[in-house]
Amino acid sequence: MKRNKNAAKLKSGKNLIMRVLGALIILGLFSAGPAPAQEKCEPLDKKQIKIEGYISKKFRKQRKAIFKEFTEMGNSKSVLRVYPMGETSKVIAIGKCVPVHIAQHVIKKAMKYSTGVESLVQQQFVHGHWIGVGVTIFDEPSQQLVSSEQVKQLLNPELSSEEFHQLYRKLSVPNELTPFFGLQVPNIKTAQPE
């Protein structure tokens, strides 16, 4: 009888230890937080820049020529479509491996053939060799509104690729509070520029 009680106590003690260890492991995983992926930028001759998104419906008849205009800088491929209704989103997303001359060229074309550029997406949410024009796949907390003056800063021909991306990251940091059902709540999608 005593053996059964001791065995039961030992078993319940082991169960308690396993539960506590499991809880500590889970807490450790959540407290560590996500580590930013350090993607290496491959050379453009190995990995082209993908330009994806929408142009305004009013340019539907000239779409083939316009799609070629987006890629005329070379080292890029276009997967653009005509927006099916209304106006395109005023969002642009630029990956960290995109050279400044391609990024600035696409911004200019986006301003000409879509509804404009009024919002930037954080680079942490974008593949390094990707540009999104008028895309609707990013929610508002991952974007930051920019003024036309700030867009002009990005189009400065004096910028190097590194300076361009530093400025882009600085301008694309979203607000700390974001609207949520009529309230201002902390934005969980904020990241400080590198």
Image: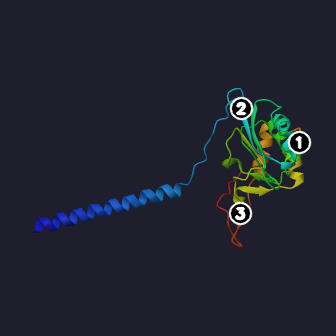
Q: Nearer the viewer, residue 181 or 27?
A: 181
Give the secondary structure at mark 2.
loop
Q: CA distance from mark 3 to mark 2?
A: 34 Å
Placement of 108 over or under 148, stated as above or below: above
Left or right of 12? Residue 126 is: right
Which mark sits nearer the N-terminus, 1 or 3?
1
Picture coordinates of residue 11, whole percent (x, y): 23, 62
Q: Residue at x 90, y 52 (%)?
A: 149
Give the secondary structure at mark 1.
loop
**Mark 3 Cα shell of 10 Å, populated few (<14), some (14-19), many (≥20):** some
Q: Nearer the viewer, residue 164 or 141?
A: 141
**Mark 3 belongs to which amino acid?**
Glu
Q: Are marks 3 and 2 in contact (CB under 8 Å)?
A: no
Q: Residue at x 69, y 71 (%)?
A: 181
Left or right of 93? Residue 56 is: right
Give the secondary structure at mark 3.
loop
Q: Residue at x 32, y 61 (%)?
A: 17
Which mark sits nearer the N-terminus, 3 or 2?
2
Q: Which residue is mark 1?
A: 156
Q: Residue at x 85, y 35 (%)?
A: 65
**Mark 2 belongs to which amino acid?**
Gln
Q: Are marks 1 and 3 in contact (CB under 8 Å)?
A: no
Q: Which residue is mark 3?
A: 176
**Mark 1 belongs to which amino acid?**
Asn
Picture coordinates of residue 20, whole percent (x, y): 37, 62
Q: Residue furthest top?
A: 45
Q: CA distance from mark 1 to mark 3?
A: 28 Å
Picture coordinates of residue 109, whole percent (x, y): 86, 42
Quadrant location of the N terminus?
Answer: bottom left
Q: Which residue is mark 2?
A: 48
**Mark 2 Cα shell of 10 Å, populated few (<14), some (14-19), many (≥20):** some
Mark 3 vs mark 2: give the one in front: 2
